[in-house]
Image (cartoon, rainbow, N blue to C red):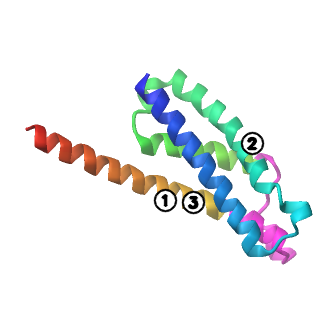
Amino acid sequence: MKNIFLSLLIFVVMSLLHAQFTEWAVRMLGLPGGDFGMYSYLILIFCSMMTAVGLVTVILFKKSYQSILRIAILFEVIYLLFLIISGNNPFLYFSDSTNENLLMIMMYGIAGLVFLCMFLVHLFYLKIISSKNKNLS
């Protein structure tokens, strides 16, 4: 049961990070609010669906998802598959250089940035656990 709550927490944090970074990317690019104002909420809705898929996967394969890093990898793989399936083509920017197409590239970069954040959390968590084990010895 512990890994289900841990995975839910990780999925929620990663969903919120994706939505926030997307909001910042839309603002940074100066995209029109009418077309892209709710884009981060759309990402949050997609991430909630990915959270459901990820939780089902974690429940089915409990023994495989015991670490933060594995759960984060699962979320990012599902997220990247969702981007590909939704028609988010990052290579359009090279043929049509617009800010909308640059946002498509940034969506993949945001995925890498969120994964990097979760990797750092994983390392920090391991450091805390190892120091706690040393104190108990």
- Residue at horizontal 53 percent and vertical 23 percent from the top: 59
Magenta span: 85-107
For marks 2 and 1 on the same chain, the one whose residue lies earlier in the sequence: 2
Count of numbered labels shown in the rendering = 3
* Tag 1 secondary structure: helix
* Tag 2 secondary structure: helix
Mark 2–mark 1 distance (CA, rounded to whole Å): 22 Å
Are circles 3 and 1 on residues that touch, CB within 8 Å?
yes
Q: Which residue is mark 1?
A: 116
Q: Which residue is mark 3?
A: 112
Mark 3–mark 1 distance (CA, rounded to whole Å): 6 Å
The three-letter code of the residue at mark 3 reads Gly
For marks 3 and 2 on the same chain, the one whose residue lies earlier in the sequence: 2
Picture quadrant where residue 49 is located? top right
- Residue at horizontal 26 percent and vertical 48 percent from the top: 128
Q: Residue furthest right?
A: 34
Question: Which of pointers 3 and 2 indicates the residue nearer the eye?
Answer: 2
- Residue at horizontal 52 percent and vertical 55 percent from the top: 115
Q: Where is residue 109 drawn, in percent x and y? A: 63, 64
Main structural element of the magenta stretch: helix, strand or loop? helix
The three-letter code of the residue at mark 2 reads Ile
Q: Is residue 100 left or right of residue 48?
A: right
